[in-house]
Image (cartoon, rainbow, N blue to C red):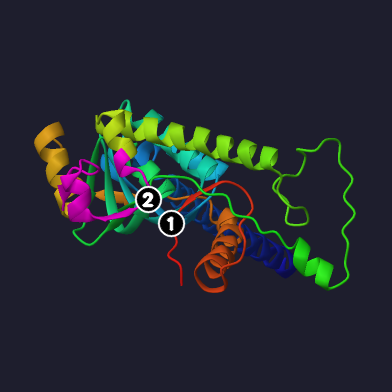
Amino acid sequence: MSLDADMIFDRRRLKRALTLWRLLALAALAGLAVVAAGRLGGTGLLARDHVARIAIDGIIFDDAERTRAIKDLVHRKDVKAVIVRVDSPGGTFVGGEALYGALRHVAESKPTVAVMGGTATSAGYMVAIAADHIVARRGTLTGSIGVILQTADVTRLLDKLGIKPEIFKSGPMKAQPNPFESLSDTARKATQDMLMELYGQFVDLVALRRALPREKVLALADGRVYSGNSAKDNGLVDAIGDEETARDWLQTVHGLPRDLPVRDLQLDEDALPWRDALTSQLQKALFSERLRLDGVFSLWHPSL
């Protein structure tokens, strides 16, 4: 009889323990769901109307995940407007072009305003002009409209060292420019023509988005950098101020209440380490060691 009672007691205790673990598991799942919803920016039942803030910092690369996340804002009913914070000296032409396209896609259905930080030059400026309205600080450095491709001719140095590179290629224009070969006149012209084609595309974007005559943009787009004040005087930005100035514009022009919360656009954190490491290394190369860059960049970096 005592044995039966002990068995019944043990079973009840086991059942209570199982019930407790089930409740804990459900609570954990609910917590994960809340975290996931937060990372998605408050979609679904937790969605609240807000202004999305997108940060474009550092060297700009073609980042497929970030581009996709920006484009997805079009389908977010809780996102009522977008603020793009730009603090970048530029980067690859393709990276700037991709961000420009993604932001224009969003701006077709949601008010979009750019707020410049300390620097918004080259591809950084290309990103900013995708917005409907651009706000800069007085001391912001912007402009530097143009493209650059850097290489070096080390053939004479190698010759002094007694090194003769052997290069096998399918045609004379393959791998041009190439530091191990002197640049021919034909290759030099082809490279310059390609750069001028990309430069023309950049100029056309500025003329289109800033509603300026192409001739005026060409005069402004000689690679020089402008202060925020000078950029406003030349029609490259719309206003001097900060994010509060951008909120004023959203309220005045689009009727968005000032108390609408602002939320940062969250990206998958797993993709961030490699990008941060790569950006850090490139910034060291550009601003400290002045190493050669491969590829076409729309980038401003002062000579040190």
Q: Residues within 10 Å of mark 2 (few under 14, many from 20)?
A: many
Dot 2 amino acid type: Ser
Which residue is drawn at the image coordinates 70% and 59% (left, top)? 153
Q: Is residue 154 above or below residue 233?
A: below
Which residue is drawn at the image coordinates 67% and 42% (left, top)? 185
Q: Please tell me the numbered disc located at residue 300.
A: 1
Q: Residue 190 at x, y = what percent?
A: 63, 36
**Disc 2 element:** loop
The answer to whether residue 98 is seen in the rendering is yes
Which image quadrant: the N terminus? bottom right
Dot 1 amino acid type: Trp
The magenta-colored residue range is: 219-240
Residue 8 found in image quarter: bottom right
Name the N-terminal-most of marks 1 and 2.
2
Image position of 29 (left or right of 41): right
Foreground pick, 219 / 237: 219
Magenta span contains residue 228: yes
Residue 248 found in image quarter: top left
Q: Residue 166 at x, y = what percent?
A: 90, 54
Foreground pick, 26 / 261: 261
Q: Residue 281 at x, y = what percent?
A: 59, 67
3D distance between C-alphas at marks 1 and 2? 6 Å
Q: Residues within 10 Å of mark 1 (few under 14, many from 20)?
A: many
Q: Residue furthest front?
A: 185
Q: Which residue bears the numbered disc 2?
A: 144
The answer to whether residue 71 is seen in the rendering is no
Q: Is residue 243 above or below residue 214?
A: below
Marks 2 and 1: in contact by CB < 8 Å? yes
**Disc 1 element:** loop
